Image: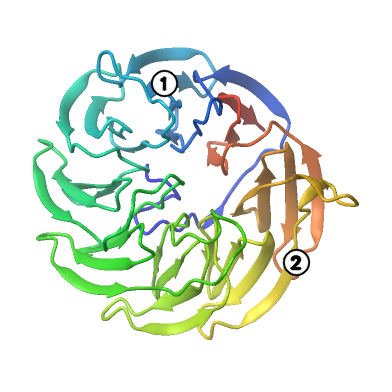
Amino acid sequence: MQVAGNIGRNSGHLAHAGGYARQWSSSIGDGNDDGLTLVAQPVSDGTTIYAMDTESMLSATSLTNGARKWEVELAPENEEADEVSGGGLAMVGDTLIAATIFGEVISLSAVDGGVNWRTNIGIPLANNPLLIGDFVVVQALNGQATALDLLSGTVSWVEIGAPAGPSHDRIAAAAGEGDFVVHPGIGGEFVGIRLLDGGRIFIDFPTTRRSDSVLDATTTITASPLILPQGVLVATRNGHTSLLSKQSGARIWSLPFGLRDTPVVAGDVAFMLDQGQRLRAVSLAQGKLFWTKTMQRFEDEEDLEDPINWFGPLLVNGKLLLVSDTGLLELRDVNNGEVLGRQDIEEAAMAPIFVNGLMLLLSQSGNLVAYR
């Protein structure tokens, strides 16, 4: 299973037969605390969910009742995560691939957590790996992309990216299609790469805009690129959202706002949450805005206190679903963005995943919570 559903990173239209009543909760270990943030989105094979905590503890949990099946410590002996967050997961068949903040890519058995191989890249790794063909592509906190052989862990090629300082923010994952990979660098660039040999096809540098926020003023890319029939949908956190040609990287259109989370696409419409917490619907063909709705930005909106951070959107049963770090779930109309439903949930660390009738949410405190 890839994060966002497939190697192109578009989660698509999700089916969810159940509702959103809490079924069970199970701890994966350490959550957001002491400067560390949960980054790795869990993955599942349909019977088990696999998750990694902020200290690089990997665990397998039953989808039936939340019981722990196994756990394995991925941190090298005598090393701790300190105050840098990173790492990620992906899986194919009964093989898990873990990328760690300690610079290792590790292939493990999904059955018992046994290690097949481990390769030390030597640079802290930032996000969920891309599994495409016979390759694993991982992103580093310094913006480097590395491709490894899926069966042996041998390094196949390295893309350095544009010169930039190390990122201390969440970093987007690469996307792929056939022999084509799009690598989001930390200098705000998107690099089109040939999978087989690592050769560059194009490089694009989206522009940024002025901001009073240190984080918002960075060129960091936190929304993963989407490879679509229409082109490659890309966005920096602070800057522009653009559709690029897959052949040349030329911009087909561009809109003057950045994104924090990966959009979701259905047909010609991309639904996205911008850095200002505005939910937008955009035509992929023309880059035209269909509608915009502002999400609740503060718990105390009168005094502008206690900010709310939203994750999503996901497209579930024909509705847009978003969750927040303050424990809210909202369903919104795809036609106009109006609220269709709202309820309390656990405080989210990231967008949920949907597996076999369950919504699985990783909470700020490090709990996996199942809803049906």
Image height check: is 79 above or below 301? above
Dot 2: element: strand
Instruction: Find disc 2 in the rendering and name its residue.
Output: 293
Q: Toward the viewer: 183 or 4?
A: 183
* Image quadrant occupied by the N terminus: top left
| Element on which disc 1 rests | strand
Residues 123 and 212: in front is 212
Q: Where does residue 206 sit, x and y in percent of width and height?
A: 42, 73
Q: Residue at x 47, y 57 (%)?
A: 223
Indicate which label's residue lies in the foreground, 1 or 2.
2
Residue 48 visible within the image = no
101 versus 28 height, above or below: below
Callout 1–callout 2 Cβ contact below 8 Å: no
| Amino acid tagged 1 | Ala
Which disc, if any, is residue 94?
A: none
Q: What mark, if any, has residue 60 been given in the picture? A: 1
Q: Does 323 sit left or right of 219 as displayed? A: right
- Mark 1 vs mark 2, CA separation in Å: 38 Å
Judged left or right of residue 148, residue 17 is right
Which residue occupies 51% across, 20% down?
30
What residue is shown at x 57% (from left), y 77% (from top)?
256
As drawn, 55 above or below 228: above
Report whether 133 appears left or right of 344. Answer: left
Q: At 46% across and 54% down in the image, what residue appears?
A: 222
Question: x and y percent of residue 171 in the render?
Answer: 41, 50
